[in-house]
Structures are given as structure tokens and as C-alpha cells.
Image: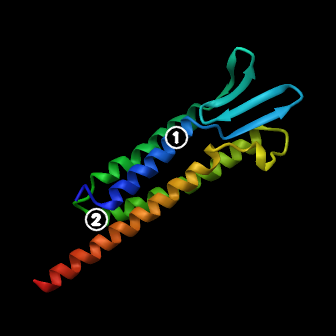
């Protein structure tokens, strides 16, 4: 059952969360210079590259843990009820994580951010939630299929 569609959705949810390390959450331009806010910290854009000004160690650790959870859930295919419950718990955790991201983003900039300042990374947690919900639908349809096959026996 590892080759089921929910395995692909869980993998894509994990990939979306890991992509937070690649794409910035926001790019801020103020009088002191340009800054890039990423999961790992706040970086100042200089002539010779990025210089890290502030580090988000706890956020980085939580991001890695949240990104690994869907990969672990792929291998719980033998216990679909447990897999379903853990997918819903993961959805709640990612939603709380998204709120935490927005709070950090607001607190790290004194300026009000415009829509054009946000990076691709800000929407990746929402994409992960979408893939987790699609995985839950796939697990639920598998459960219905197994129940109907059991009724026929």
C-alpha cells in the first residue's frame, strides 16, 4: 500500500515544508538596507552576499521536525486509523506553525509589509496543509474500499 496516492501527497507536504529552507519568507527594504527573512534567520543583503543578523534556531528545529512527520506517516500504511489521526494532528500543528511564522514575521520588521514584500516561502505551509488534507481524503477512501471488500466476504 506504499504506492497509494496519499503517499505522494504526504511526500509533497514534506517537500513543501523542506522548501521553506530554500525560499525566503519576506524581503524587507528600509533605510538601513535590504533584509531577507528566512526560516533560519534574518539576513542583511550586502555586496558580497548575505550576512546573518539574527538566528531562528527554535524555528529551524521545529521546521525540520514538522517536515519529517509526513515522511514518517507514509510508512504507517498498515494502520490507517492511526495514520488518519496523525495526519489531522499534523494539519493542526502546521496551522499553528503558520501562525507562529506570521507572528515572527510581524515582530521582526518594524515596517508594515506590503504584498510585494512577501516571498514564496510564506505560502508553502498553506500548500503543505492542502497536501495533508488530500492525503487524509486518500486514506479515508482506502478505508472505505477495505470496508466494502470486507462486507463482500
Q: Residue at x 74, y 23 (%)?
A: 45
In-image side of 29 versus 61 (left or right)? right
**Residue 27 in which image quadrant:** top right
Q: Disc 1 designates what residue?
A: 19
Q: Secondary structure at mark 2?
A: helix
Q: Residue at x 40, y 65 (%)?
A: 136
Q: In the rendered view, would you say 26 is above or below 151?
A: above
Q: Secondary structure at mark 1?
A: helix
Q: Residue at x 51, y 36 (%)?
A: 61
Q: Disc 2 designates what residue?
A: 80
- Seen as rendered, the residue at the extreme left is 153
Of residues 130 and 103, the one nearer the viewer is 130
Quarter of the image where the C terminus is located? bottom left
Counting from the top left corner in percent of width and height, residue 33 is at 83, 26
Q: Nearer the viewer, mark 2 or mark 1?
A: 1
**Residue 35 in which image quadrant:** top right
Q: Residue at x 76, y 41 (%)?
A: 107
In-image side of 143 versus 86 (left or right)? left
Pointer 2 with pointer 1, Cβ within 8 A: no
**Residue 106 in which image quadrant:** top right
Q: Residues within 10 Å of mark 2 (few under 14, many from 20)?
A: some
Counting from the top left corner in percent of width and height, residue 128 is at 50, 53
Counting from the top left corner in percent of width and height, residue 93 is at 51, 54
Amino acid at each position: 500500500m506504499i504506492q497509494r496516492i496519499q503517499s505522494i501527497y504526504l511526500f509533497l507536504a514534506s517537500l513543501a515544508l523542506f522548501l521553506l529552507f530554500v525560499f525566503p519568507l519576506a524581503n524587507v527594504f528600509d533605510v538601513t538596507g535590504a533584509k531577507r527573512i528566512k526560516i533560519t534567520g534574518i539576513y542583511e543583503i550586502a555586496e558580497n552576499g548575505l550576512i546573518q543578523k539574527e538566528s531562528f534556531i527554535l524555528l529551524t528545529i521545529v521546521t525540520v521536525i514538522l517536515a519529517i512527520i509526513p515522511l514518517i506517516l507514509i510508512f504507517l500504511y498498515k494502520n490507517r486509523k492511526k495514520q488518519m489521526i496523525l495526519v489531522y494532528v499534523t494539519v493542526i500543528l502546521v496551522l499553528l506553525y503558520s501562525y507562529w511564522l506570521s507572528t515572527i514575521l510581524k515582530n521582526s520588521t518594524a515596517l508594515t509589509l506590503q504584498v510585494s514584500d512577501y516571498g514564496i516561502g510564506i505560502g508553502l505551509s498553506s500548500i503543505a496543509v492542502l497536501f495533508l488534507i488530500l492525503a487524509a481524503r486518500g486514506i479515508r477512501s482506502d478505508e472505505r474500499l477495505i470496508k466494502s471488500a470486507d462486507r463482500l466476504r
